[in-house]
Amino acid sequence: MQTRNFADLQTSWSKLNPGRRFWSCPCYASKNCKFFRWRDKEEVDPRSSFILPRLVNKINELEQELCIRQVHIDNLRNSNLLLERRLNRRLKWCRFNRKILCVF
């Protein structure tokens, strides 16, 4: 497949090439275009090669933790809604009973 798009400059976050820049077709993933070239003019310093994968892992861990906490928050909200409904039913029941008692 041949496309006429400009290549995108991206950054590799893999363990083997952390921080290494490369060119790829904008359709690389979606339309099965396989254009890919390393941009070898720049070198990643050893410190960055050491730090970048750890930062990416930390970001992934934090995103997973965020998802877990979001599910927990959603569960608490659902629980809260159920409790509010139950409370409202009981309040209505109490008002109803009070009206009946007032009549007698």
Image (cartoon, grey):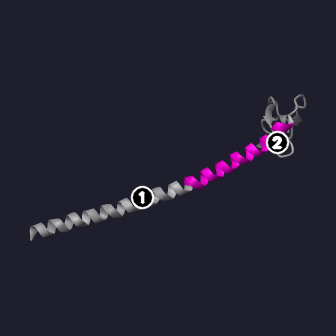
> Which of label 1 and label 2 is nearer to you?
2
Instruction: Name the residue furthest right.
Output: 40
Residue under the point 48% across and 58% down: 76
Please give the label number shown on residue 80: 1
In this view, 62 is above or below 89 = above
Helix, strand or loop at label 1? It is helix
Q: Position of residue 55 (x, y in %)?
A: 73, 43
Left or right: residue 100 versus residue 93 is left
- Which amino acid does the dot numbered 2 rest on? Phe
- Please identify the quarter of the rendering in which residue 71 is found: bottom right
Q: Position of residue 49 (x, y in %)?
A: 83, 40
Nearer the observer, 34 or 23: 23
> The N terminus appears in which quarter of the rendering?
top right
- Please identify the quarter of the rendering in which residue 32 is found: top right
| Disc 2: which residue | 50
Give the magenta part as a residue range. 46-70
Is residue 67 a member of the stretch shown in magenta? yes
Residue under the point 54% across and 57% down: 72
Left or right: residue 69 versus residue 54 is left
- Which amino acid does the dot numbered 1 rest on? Asn
Residue under the point 31% across and 61% down: 88
Q: In the rendered image, is residue 72 in sight?
A: yes
Q: If you read the primary sequence from the N terminus, does the residue marked by circle 1 or circle 2 appear first?
A: 2
Is residue 8 a member of the stretch shown in magenta? no
